[in-house]
Each structure stands twice: as C-alpha cells, then as structure tokens.
Image (cartoon, rainbow, N blue to C red):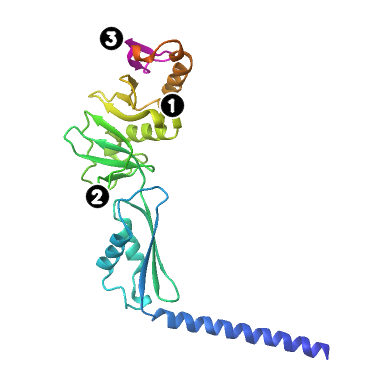
Amino acid sequence: MNRTKHILRIAAKVVAGCAVLAALGFVERSGGSLPVRDIEVEMDMSSGMHFIDSEALKQEVIKGAGPVIGTPINKVDETGIEQRLRAIPCVAEADVYHTMDGILKVKVRQREPIVRVVNADGSGFYIDKEGWTMPLNRNYTARVMVVTGQLAEPFAERAPVNVAFGNDSLALHTHSRAIHALAQTIIADPLWNALFCQAVVDANGDITLIPTVGMMRVRIGDGTHFQQRLTKLRMFFAEGIPQTDWRRYSTIDLRFDDQVVCTKRTHY
C-alpha cells in the first residue's frame, strides 16, 4: 500500500512538472507574438552626468527601430537597438531586453569624463575614466579638470577613440594619453583633486598645474612619473611650506630627480 502511494506521488510530480513545462512553452510561444506596449528607459545617474536624458534615448530607439510600440516582441531587433545606443558618444553601456508583459526595457550607463581638453584653436573634447574620447555637449558641461595650451589634439570631431590603451597611432603621437594619465592621478587623490582644476601644456609637451587658490604654478614635466613628482610636492607642502609662506614662490618645479626647485616672487 505504501509502495503504491509512493508511486502515485512520483507520478503526480511528473505530471505536474510536465504541465509546468507545457505552460512555459505556451507562454514562450504566445509571448513572442505579444505586442510591445511600452518602452521603459532606466539610466544610471550615479555619476551625476546629464549628457542625454531618458526621453532622448526613447526617441533614439524609436527612430532607429521604427514603430516599436505595437510591434510583436519577436520582431524587435533588441541587439540592433543596443548597437545603435552604444554608438552614441556619451553612452558607455546599453542593455535592451523585454518582459513577458510586453515592456521593452532599455538600461543605459553614460560615460563619465574626468578631463576636458581645449585645443589652441578653441576646439575641444572630453576624455572619460576609461580613456575614451567624447565630443563636447551643447546642453551640458561636465565639471572636470580643464587642460589648455599649445594643443592640437585631433579628437574633437572624430568618433570615440581610446587614448589610454592599445597602439592607436593618433593616441601614441599626441598628448592625450599623458593628459588622461594626469587626470586619473589628480582625481584619485582628494588633496590634488581639490587643489588643481587646470593644467597647461607648452609647445614641448611639458605640463604645468594651475591651483584653485594662489598664483603659484607647479611644473610637472612630460607625461611620465606623475606619481613620484606629486609625492615630492606633498613632502614639500608638509615640510617646506609651513616654514615659509608659499606666496613667496611663483613656480614650483618638480621635473628634476630628488629635488624641488622653487622660484621666488619679486613682490607678493
């Protein structure tokens, strides 16, 4: 008797499992023909960037994929939509998928610039955390470090290029790789991030940092040894500045090994 009950319980579980699988199969088949009834855009705003908004992204989806609303789910090219959204210069990531109730979900993460490069001719662009170039945006300006000077970086009107990695010939023969490395070094340290808001590149490629306060200029050299040179500056601030007024100096030069060279002001 007990064996019969055991067999019946197993049979009931098998039947129930088959019923669930059949139901799922039906939902899958019928869900494919379910029309899209809405598009929901979710943006990661944790970085505080506002280069593009949800409505503009929704319009981009509609413009590229046609009349999405009312189209059967299985006729919507979700991969194609993702590719079009990722082609937008300010978009770092895009994920498009649908729910079983006919909602097309669009998740987007914007690029996060860390430095703005301004060429000598007035053209400019951003470089984001990951090293990708970004065009300027007429509707939004990111509050980031600005680098100016004798620059002619060719990325203002080009499609995004990663200047931090790889062997791209433009990245290797311009100042943008060094500028990105400097910006990463500055934002990674609370003191430098608060102190330096601008840098200037001269015709030789040497970089001078401009502090947010005071008239002092900090010469940091080319795109190498930023960490070591800023470590010297920190030591100088800790040991040298308390003993003298830093307003006495017009420049602090960190380009030389194991020394900090200061130029005194004539008047202050």
Task: Select label 2 or label 3 by which is in front.
Answer: 3
Extreme-right residue of the structure = 1
Q: Position of residue 236 (x, y in %)?
A: 44, 16
191 to 52, vertically: above or below: above
Q: Tell whether position 107 is magenta.
A: no
Q: Position of residue 83 (x, y in %)?
A: 33, 60
Q: Residues within 10 Å of mark 2 (few under 14, many from 20)?
A: few
Label 1, on which residue?
Answer: 227
Please state which of residues 69 and 94 is positioned toward the viewer in this rendering. Answer: 69
Label 3, on which residue?
Answer: 267
Residue type, mark 1 in image: Gln
Q: Residues within 10 Å of mark 1 (few under 14, many from 20)?
A: few
Q: Residues within 10 Å of mark 3 (few under 14, many from 20)?
A: few
Residue type, mark 2 in image: Asn
Please state which of residues 110 and 130 is positioned toward the viewer in this rendering. Answer: 110
Please state which of residues 237 and 229 is positioned toward the viewer in this rendering. Answer: 237
